[in-house]
Amino acid sequence: MFRKLHEPVETVTIYVEGRPVAAEPGESVAAVLLRQAVVWSRPTPVKGSKRAPYCMIGVCFDCLAQVDGIGSVQTCMTPVEEGMKVERQQRQRCLPS
Amino acid sequence: MSKTDLLIVGAGPAGMTAAITARRYGIDVLVVDDQTSPGGQIWRAVETQAATPRGAILGRAYQEGKATADAFRASGARYEPRTQLWQVEPGFRAFVTHDGKARTIEARAIILATGAQERPTPFPGWTLPGVLTVGAAQVLLKTAGQIPSKPVWVAGCGPLPLLYLVQLLNAGGRIAGYLDTTPAGRHWAALRRLPKALGAGGALLKGLAWKTVLRRRRVPIIRHVIDLEAHGAERLEAISYRTADGQQTTVSADNLFVHEGVVPNIHAALGLGCAVEWRDEQDCYVPVLDQWGETSKAGIFVAGDGAGIAGAKAGQCRGALAAQRLAVKLGYADEQIVIKEAARVQKSLACELALRPFLDAMFRPHSRIFSPSDETVICRCEEVTAGEIRAMARIGSGPNQIKAFTRAGMGPCQGRQCGYTVTRILAEIQNCPAREVGFYRVRPPLKPVTLGELATLDQEEEVL
Amino acid sequence: MHPEIIVIGAGTVGAAIAYGLARRQCRVLVLDGDDRDHRAARANFGLVWLQGKGQNMPAYQQLSRRSVDMWSDFAAELTDLAKLDLHYEQNGGLAFCLGEDAFEKRRSDLQRLHNQLGGAEADWRMLDRAELTRLLPKVRLGPDVAGASFGQRDGHANPLQLLAALHAGILRLGGDLRRNVAVRQIVPGEAGFTVAFGNETVCAPRVLIAAGLGSQALAQQVGLEIPLRPQRGQILVTERVEPFLPLPTSGLRQTREGTVMIGATHEETGFDSSATAVAAADLSRRTLRIVPGLAEAKLVRQWAGLRIMTPDGCPVYAQSQTHPGAFAALCHSGVTLAALHSTVLADAILAGQLPDTLDIFHQGRFDVPKAA
């Protein structure tokens, strides 16, 4: 859906659903997700409809994902970090029991 | 708990300039911002990108932000990035979270420089992956050097789509077409306001230059588009639209970027109980402000696009004026001296504002976008349709009653995506102007915060 | 339209009575206030609750019991008419006890209340931590939880859907519901009561004041002195999470949508209905002592409502002695009592006479003998 204009000089590796993905320091997790072959989407908690990042400024909450085990993270507001693990959030969140 | 004389919320053009100005008078300033670096949306990532090829793609108005960011860094204002404001109480006590911890900030005065968001314009399929706002696409270009991999459809009205299309061409991107939703007749409406706008001639020329570039590069432009729809099962696959002659067209699409203007972020001001007024020509509420930007709540100021859409330069002027007024109010400067110093800023602001009536008239969205079809989801969080709002409007009346009855506005975005649509639908059903309908009551938190973060709040009192 | 009764107030109390009246073929005119008025009906926690009620007034416990026992039929009829699901469940409810002392105190409080009622079969019991863990398999309880009291008649409903359904029901039954009107004056006269609102005046042989905290001034105009005060209650609600809490509890319940409601404070702060960070922090801390796993849940919204409090916290049902035909109904448990309001109370108002069983709820109980 999206491509980068340039080959980043410096990269970090984040894990999207367990798969290693190169990312550039300073960019948001949402930006990386929009470059994936399978369009990133989360099923909504209400009807399970598929969503992807929409506003990129933190006001729509459609880019929520699980980041490093924490649910409902706004990925458009979260810069990538080496080793970060990003998972799709399945509808309603499961709380740790 | 930390204390400051002046808390500034937001580090965009207005917030940074307010901080720089306030520091000049020696005011103790703390700036909190939810982004990782200063610049706001217009100058996102400007510190690292201004001098790069990406900066060149984005244009001079973008690159100019670097100087302000540098001055801000050098101003001596305390700056806390990645910090979200979730509540403000009288006194003032501001509550923020940073890195999983909640904290209280005591401030004698607050400048809300929280900018704008793109006007939510629901249409069938707008929630599909692959549909983004033009602003979102531009943020991706600024922060990640990222453009659509296939020819993109852009639909909307306003200067931003034109600017983004030019930037995309500069970056080597491909454009399937621009669906211009500006209704017929807007040019004539705008022309009446042209003489006043000529004072800000530079901005007008910029707009003309963008259009020339699009023509020269043979970007397909389809005018007076209505009834835009996005189609697809799990992601965007096609779009359809109608043109003025009634003809409907369906084309395949990988990405669709939409934009129907911007509206002020008024949630923080509303949450504080600041008075707002409806502005017809911008189809939105704006806080009621005095000439310095002070709201109906003494000590709370709004600067920048949050005070009414007027652009970065006007935002800088408003930021400076708010800080100047506070220099007097907080006892850092003599009123007479400040009045003299502010005169120049007021003149620049007047010049910037002179352009607005022209732009507002030129790019006023089609009234149809405020009346989405029944099957359109209008609340993205709770997935409530326009039809459900209309059905409940037969039982309940005000926006808060409709929120209670339908759950529209109860999700994590706090009504930022559906608030105006609910107001407009109620106005249509009750056959009254939107100004009489009102808006959701804004409840804390302004941004979702975890119970764990709340439990860490540094509070001595207990109420239970 | 010539209404037989004008109901002032369309909150949960006024709307439930008006709905009951409309069901009895009574021509009702219901006057609802502005969208931004204080509205306890929209700030409700949603319990249909019995356990622990009536510590100082056993009749209140009995009143609540009658209503709770009618709730199921009430919900079914209303849902059928309004086509809105009230999300009503009556599978029992819990009150968590933090610490052994609190557990023992809860037991003795409930036992004393039970003894006051005399002879009835117990519909509550204390659950120790082990029993509680079995009852709530998806909840990892905090270490301080000693146990809980379990009330088998307790339940919960969606208070907003209840309000919407009552309004829809009134309209469907031919009632007249006016919105955004403030009542200026009630003038008692020969032919009944003339009520002035907006640019209108309407006359009816009967009038019911159920205008929450706005009732005091209106009631005086028909010779009823009802002392009332606002009491602030703040509530938190989280994002939607997987169902984990099968039963409502006194301060924590999971809604049908999956959101978790946390409440509520009891604050004497006058008419200030702002939500405070202090309360959010306190409520969060208490909740995390019970269910530590909720620490990760995002708070989506916090609000404050103003309870309609009488001096003893129990309802007021009264007919004016100086102006018969003028009634008042005020309480802060409009959801639990909705079933009773729409039946027993509606019948009584229609008959023009409150039954003996409701005598104890007359506002006269607050009269202080005037010093000579």
Image (cartoon, coloured by chain):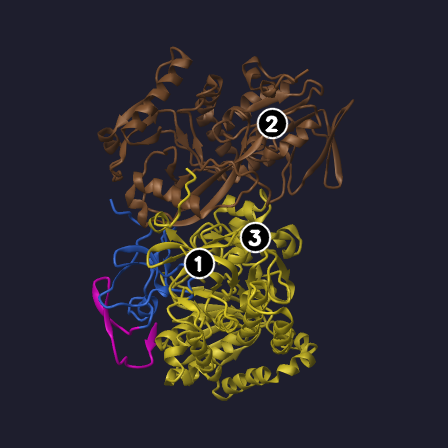
Chain colours: A blue, B yellow, C brown
Question: How many discs appear?
Answer: 3
Tell me which amino acid carries mark 2: Pro
Residue C5 % position (x, y) = 67, 27
**Do tag 2 and tag 3 residues touch (Cβ < 8 Å)?**
no
Residue displayed at 59% across by 33% down: C212
The residue type indicated by label 1 comes to: Lys
In the structure shown, which secondary structural element does the residue marked by tag 3 occupy?
Answer: loop
Left or right of C34, for residue B449:
left
| Helix, strand or loop for disc 2 | loop
x, y percentage for residue B232?
Answer: 39, 63
Mark number displayed over residue C200:
none
Give the mark nearer the N terminus: 3 vs 1: 1
Pointer 2 residue: C227
The mark closer to the camera, 3 or 1, is: 1
Query: What's drawn in magenta, residue-wise?
Result: A1-25
**Would you name the residue on which mark 1 appears?**
B3
Residue corresponding to mark 3: B273
Magenta-span inclusion, residue A9: yes
Say if the magenta span includes residue C339: no
- Kindly identify which chain the residue marked by label 1 belongs to: B
Q: Is residue B137 above or below residue A75?
A: below
Question: Measured from the top left, where is residue C327 in percent x and y?
Answer: 64, 24
The amino acid pointed to by label 3 is Gly
Mark 3 → mark 1, Cα distance in angstroms: 23 Å
Q: Position of residue C211 (x, y in %)?
A: 61, 33
In this orientation, which residue lies closer to the viewer: B356 or B390? Answer: B356
In the picture, measured across the screen, residue C204 lies left or right of residue C51, that is: right
Residue at 42% across, 78% down:
B70
Note whether residue B149 is visible: no
